[in-house]
Image (cartoon, rainbow, N blue to C red):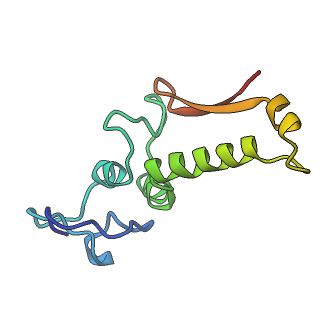
Amino acid sequence: MAWDKPSPSLTTQFYGFGNGRYGHPDQDRAISLREGALLQGFPADYKFVETSNEVHFRKLGRLIGNAVPVKLGEVIGKTIIEHANSCTPDNSVTKRLKQPKIEAKLDTTSQKLHLEDQL
């Protein structure tokens, strides 16, 4: 990997130096789980497990490697919501105006996406 180039897509084995393209750009090692999470767009303080729970390195690596990048998930979700709000079975303007609007909000304290109906 290089600082001035896009990173490769992560896989579930990104944390292993022998698994391909995931070498740290300056240090002779694979990228860490946290570095992989940052590449996927997770906030630096995102908690994958409760503090009291045991961390399973391989399971966590799989979660991060299989994750949809955060920003991509936001764009896809917003597109689906916009589409749902603009469509009706017969495309009637009056029905469309009466449909509730749906908004997605990201709760930054719990990192959970909430869908809310707006009447």
Residue at (17%, 65%) from the top-left corner?
A: 29
- From what the image shows, is residue 46 above or below residue 3? above
Instruction: Indicate the quadrant containing the N terminus: top left, top right, bottom left or bottom right.
Output: bottom left
User: Is residue 8 shown left or right of residue 89?
Assistant: left
Residue 52 x %, y %: 46, 28
- From what the image shows, is residue 26 above or below residue 106? below
- From what the image shows, is residue 52 above or below residue 1? above
Instruction: Indicate the quadrant containing the C terminus: top left, top right, bottom left or bottom right.
Output: top right
Task: Give residue 78's quadrant in the image.
Answer: top right
In-front residue for pair 80/112: 80
- From what the image shows, is residue 34 above or below residue 93? below
Q: Residue furthest right?
A: 90
Task: Give residue 42's quadrant in the image.
Answer: top left
In-front residue for pair 26/41: 41
User: Is residue 100 shown left or right of residue 92?
Assistant: left
Residue at (80%, 32%) from the top-left corner?
A: 97
Total label count?
A: 0
Q: Residue furthest front?
A: 93
Residue 96 x %, y %: 82, 37
Residue 69 x %, y %: 45, 54
Residue 12 x %, y %: 45, 65
User: Is residue 113 shown left or right of residue 19?
Assistant: right
In-front residue for pair 93/3: 93
User: Is residue 71 shown left or right of residue 103?
Assistant: left
